[in-house]
Structure formats: C-alpha cells, structure tokens
C-alpha cells in the first residue's frame, strides 16, 4: 500500500521523482430508473431543468475538486474533463467521464469522481418523481500514461 508509511500511518505519496507525462482516464457508471423518468430526462421536461446539462457541469466541477474530496489525492492541473451520457434501453442512463493531465500522477480518481457526482446530480434532479433510482456499476474503464502504463477493462474481458 503506497499510502502508508513504515509504521502503517497514512501518507500522501511523494511524486516528486516521477516524470510528468500525458495521462488519460475514462470511467463509467449507470443510473437505473423508471422508464417515465428516463423519458423526462430525454425530453428535457424535468421540473428542475435540463438534467444532463446540470449533471455534466457537476461532473466536470467534481473532477476539478477531487483532491478536496478524496483524502491523500494530489491536486492535479487537469487539461481536460468531459462527461457524456447515453440512453440505454428504456430505463438506464450510462455516464462516461474522461479526464486528462500532463503531470506526474494519474487522473483515475478524477474520472471516477466525475461519474459519481454526475450520477448523484441526476438523482437529485429527479428524486421528486423517482426515489427508487439506482446508481451503480461505477468503474475505471481504461487509463494510459505513467509508470504503470495502459489499463483497460476490455483487455481483462470484463
């Protein structure tokens, strides 16, 4: 565990000796809901406004604030943060976030945080009509750059 010292105490990893390289991470997650709720989002007629526009901005803002939310994360100079949505079937919203930096540590936590907060924002904006929504399947899809190199869920066959 790199976030522990010799005595088992939490530390922030020293990245001072690591090279700055381009690093990219993609994460995804889902919000399962009633078909009527998904239709409200799709039509843009939710009472609180454009659900996807607000969730997109929330996800991007969250990526930028990840170091304030996750203990021991390094603050990163993000060069890009994107959040996208896809309607899957009649009751599932797929959320994907991509984060980029040229720095000496990875951006996986920023992508995962963006997806999580975007999903929570969807829930918040639609909870009046569907309290049974289910947020799930949040995971790192792929990452590149840095000492550990490439990672992809596809390569794992998952």
Image (spheres, rainbow, N blue to C red):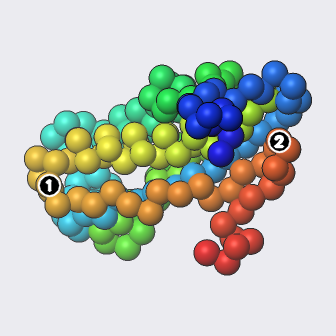
Question: From the viewer's perspective, is residue 57 above or below residue 125?
Answer: above
Mark 1 Cα-neighbour bin, 10 Å: few <14, some 14–19, many ≥20: few
Decide if residue 81 is in sight here: no
Decide if residue 151 is in sight here: yes
Question: From the viewer's perspective, is residue 143 above or below residue 107?
Answer: below
Q: In screen coordinates, is 44 left or right of 85?
A: left
Disc 1 and disc 2: Cα gap in Å? 41 Å
Q: In screen coordinates, is 17 left or right of 131?
A: right
Residue 22: x %, y % from top left: 82, 36
The N terminus appears in which quarter of the rendering? top right
Residue 84: x %, y % from top left: 51, 48
Q: Nearer the viewer, residue 135 or 51?
A: 135
Query: Badge 2 is on which residue?
Result: 146
Residue 54: x %, y % from top left: 36, 35
- Give me the residue at 81% from left, 50% from top: 148
Query: Badge 1 is on which residue?
Result: 131
């Amino acid at each position: 565990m790199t976030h522990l010292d010799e005595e088992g105490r939490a530390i922030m990893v020293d990245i001072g000796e690591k090279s700055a390289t381009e690093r990219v991470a993609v994460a995804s997650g889902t919000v399962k809901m009633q078909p009527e709720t998904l239709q409200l989002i799709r039509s843009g007629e939710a009472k609180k406004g454009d659900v996807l526009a607000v969730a997109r901005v929330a996800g991007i803002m969250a990526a930028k604030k990840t170091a304030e939310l996750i203990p021991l994360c390094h603050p990163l100079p993000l060069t890009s943060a994107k959040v996208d949505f896809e309607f899957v079937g009649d009751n599932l919203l797929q959320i994907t976030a991509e984060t980029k930096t040229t720095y000496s540590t990875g951006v996986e936590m920023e992508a995962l945080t963006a997806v999580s907060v975007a999903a929570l924002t969807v829930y918040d904006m639609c909870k009046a009509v569907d309290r049974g929504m289910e947020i799930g399947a949040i995971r790192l899809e792929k990452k590149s750059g840095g000492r550990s190199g490439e990672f992809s869920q596809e390569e794992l066959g998952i």
